[in-house]
Each structure stands twice: as C-alpha cells, then as structure tokens.
Amino acid sequence: MNPASANVLTMIMAGGRGERLYPLTRDVAKPAVTIAGCYRIIDFTLSNCFNSGMRQVYLLTQYSNVTMNRHMRLAWEPIFRVEQDEFIESLPPQHRSGEDWYHGTADSLYQNINVLQRHRPGNVLVLSGDHVYRMNYVGMIDFHVGNGAELTIAAVKIERARACEFGVMGTDPDGRVRDFVEKPENPPACPGNPEMSLCSMGVYVFSTTKLVRELIRDAKDRHSSHDFGKNIIPSLIERGDRVFAYPFRDENTGSSGYWRDIGTIDSYFACNFDLAAPQPAIDIYDRRWPIRTCVHPYPPARIVGTPGGSTRRGEAVDSLISPGCAISGARVELSVLSPEVRIHSGADVSQCVLMEGVEVGHGVALRKTIVCPGVRIPDGKRIGMDNRADRARYTVTRGGVTAVPSEYAW
Amino acid sequence: MKQKLLVVDDEENLREFYRLELEEEGYSVDTAANAGDVLNKLDAGRYDAIILDIQMPGMPGIDLLQRIVTRDRQQPVILNTSYASYQENFLAWQADAYVVKSSDTGELKQAIRKVLTGQI
C-alpha cells in the first residue's frame, strides 16, 4: 500500500432508517438487508474497503439491531487484524454533542470529531453503507493527493431522467468541480453528452483538517440540514476550495463502472437482477475481488423432481440459489433465493427475490415479487399477477414489484 | 444594552484583571472560576461570548468547551491558549477564536470585537 492510502481513516454512514425500503427494513437496518441471495447490502462497501486495504473502518450506525450486529461480528470483525492496527467498529451516536441522534450525514461525522482527533489521519474516506459497486479506493485517494484536493467526489454518469435523485456536478476539463446541486429538478447534462449527467456516488475523500473545519462551521449554522450534498459540498465550492470529481471506472473493463444506490424497493429489486444476470453487472465470482460475507454451514442447494416418482422436474434457470435451498418439482427462473428457501412441487416462481427461510407452497405462482424472511406462502396462492388485487394485500411499488412482509397473516 | 461576556479563569487575579479591562471597553462582564460555575451560569442565561482559559483544574478547558457547545452549538467561545495546543486538538476548533494568553489584552479585545460582529 502506498503512503497516501496508509494514512486514511474510513467512515461508513450506515445510519439510515430505510423507510422507503419497508417492508424489507421492518426488522433489519437498511445495510443489513439481504441482497443477491447470501450477501447483506453493506458487504459490497466493506469488501471494497477490505480489498482496497482500507482496514481502519468505523461504521456510523443509528438503528442498531441484532441482525446487523451479528453479521458484523461473524463476517467482518474476525478478518481485521488487531495486531496490525486494523479494526472495524460501530459508532452509534455517543451523545457527546448533546442528546441528539445523528441529524444528517455531516452531523454523524461532527458528533465523532473526537474519533478523528484520536486517529489524526491525513485523509478521511467517507462512504455509504447502502451502495452496491466494486471499487478500489486507492486510485481515488492517489487522485485526491495528486490534485492537492481538499475534497474528491467519486462520480458516475447517469441518464438525465434518473439524475434528479442524486447530487449533480459540473466540472472543468481537469475534473475540478465548479457546480454541485443536490437532487435538481432539471439536471444539467455532461459536456458533449446531452443524455447523461455527472452524479455524485456519495463516496468522498476529504483532507481531514478541511473536513473538521467544515463540520464545525456547518454545526454552528442553525439553518443547515447538516447534509454533505445539500450543505457541505456546495459551501466548499462556493468558497473556492479545491473540490475534484473522480471518474469511477470498472477496474477490469475501464468503462464507466456499475454503481447502484439502494434507496427504494424498485432499485433493490433491479440490483438483485443486475447481479443475477447471465452477464452480471458485478461478477461476484471474481476471486480477484471477492465479495465477502458470512454464510452458515448449510447443506448444498438441491433441485429435485417431485418425490414419489412423478415426472415433474425441479428446475432453476438464470437464478442465484443459495446454500440450504430445496426446489422440489417446481420451476424457478430469473430469481434470487437466499439460504434455506423451500419451494414445493408445482410452484412456478419467476422474477422473484425470496429471502431467508421462505417457504413456497404447492402450486403457488409468484411473479415479480419480493418475499421477506420466514414467510410461508400457502398452497395455491398467486402473487404478482394482478397488481390491483395485490395492492389490497401487500406493498406494490411504482415499478410493479410486490413485497410480502415477514409474519404476514394470510 | 451592553453585550454580556463571561470570563472563565481559575486565577482570581486574572479574572479581575480581565473584568476591569473589558468593562472599560463597555461590556458587561461576569466571571467564573471553574466548570461547575460556568455551567450554573449558563443555566441562568446566554452570553454574547465566553472567554475560556484552556488550563483549569477539575475539568480541562477543552472538555468544558465541549460541554458548552453541546448545550448550544451557536454559543460564541474564545479560547485563551497557545497556538500549538489550539492547533493540535480538533475539539478546540469548536471555539470561534483563540488568543494567546497575555497581559496585553489588545489581541483579546480584537478577537471579541470580531466574534461579536460575526467577522469570525
């Protein structure tokens, strides 16, 4: 690791309640929601950290829960080596700065200035716990140091129609950011590409002293919403500080990299299929950049015909099937199954995300549906075929995805 | 109405010295000898600025500063300290200004004027 990367402290914002992801976040914090079968959303960011050599990591958590804590304890804490000053630790609000919870992204760091004081890193890598992407942060840190930047923002090009959900930047040819507007109604286009906008990924490298000064200035501003995108970044640019956009590219292809903010059920749903596709957006099988997690020692997944000699086959195509799953005489296609999902004979599952321990009864038909952990779908149910009827019973998104919550009373 | 200052210093002679100097400038000056005294006075009301000695027995000035901004993030505070100790502690940066402790109060008076007029 080069010296610039060695002097970096990583702070991951993992405190969002994830209300727009309800019912997926009914029992777990957003970063702990299962994705791509056997991962948690935060595994992607943490794998990036670990694989990039960023091994002094704080998680700024707020809505603590058993699942998240257990996952951190089993999957992540054991691989950071204490004897080499590596660590991964959660920082819930310490109420050092009052009785407040974290109010906004910038406030979550402000309330932990004592942590920055304790470590005194040269730079701080600020990440979000609910993004799915594959990125080596070393390149960005080198870019930051090489430019003498006070803030570097990882940037990705997104179609203008969708860019209104993000912070959108305007830059000079050398990458210096001249404008930044959070969630604009009419996003400005990239130079030379009127269909795309240059958007912030919510991945930042700050020089520590500049960050601390800005956090304190922002904390004193009673009109601020203490948000990086709304307050801190526009203020730095306005005052002429050196803010740069780092073009995010896929490590292997060199083209614009895949990045997805898991903000809604629809984006969560789409991301699952991006990862399950025959040509996946991120190759989770690439051993050069392993996505780490912790899976219990379940038996292998098995796919069998109907017991008793019937001719009905069990099959799964274009799908991710986690360990411990059993598909008996049922058809599964274009779907993502978490561990210990049982699908009984005659069931037909297409374009679905079935979370841990879901049981699908005989003859059930599921289309474009997310089923939350532990749900047992009674024999013969049909879900996802009729959005209007489903709306009366379940959550149905704007994109037409049906979500069945845990402990659903049939 | 006179602007209200609170001078915090564990040495009585210095408290009186600052009080006289700053009253001459037209301020209403209150004094406190320790952290408990400061927090009790803040319970009773707000000050336009607090001049805080960083080296105090009982609770260090940095910890007291933290307690003050915890109660009110907008409370202006001027630290009486050395450049080095101010510079090396991020928590000290929560103060609005620092001055080097000295018998020459010119720097302090200037810092107070700047803080009170929002120039810092």
Image: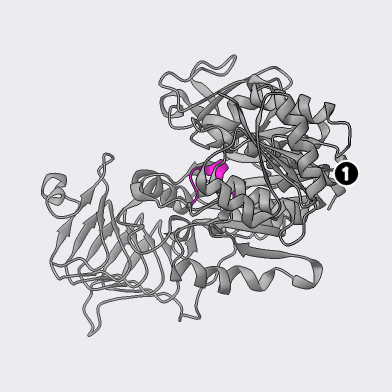
Q: Chain of mark 1?
A: B
From what the image shows, is residue A8 above or below residue B30? below
Residue shown at 50%/42% (left/top)? A104
From what the image shows, is residue A74 above or below residue A393? below
Quadrant in the picture for residue A299: bottom left
Q: Position of residue A173 (x, y in %)?
A: 71, 17
Q: Nearer the viewer, residue A402 or B4?
A: B4
- Magenta stretch in the rendered image: A101-112
Q: Position of residue A93 (x, y in %)?
A: 53, 57
Q: Position of residue A209 (x, y in %)?
A: 76, 39
Q: Which residue is mark 1?
A: B84
Is residue A102 inside the magenta stretch? yes
Q: Secondary structure at mark 1?
A: helix
Q: Position of residue A105 (x, y in %)?
A: 53, 43
A144 relative to A395 in the view: left or right:
right
Residue shown at 60%/28% (left/top)? B3
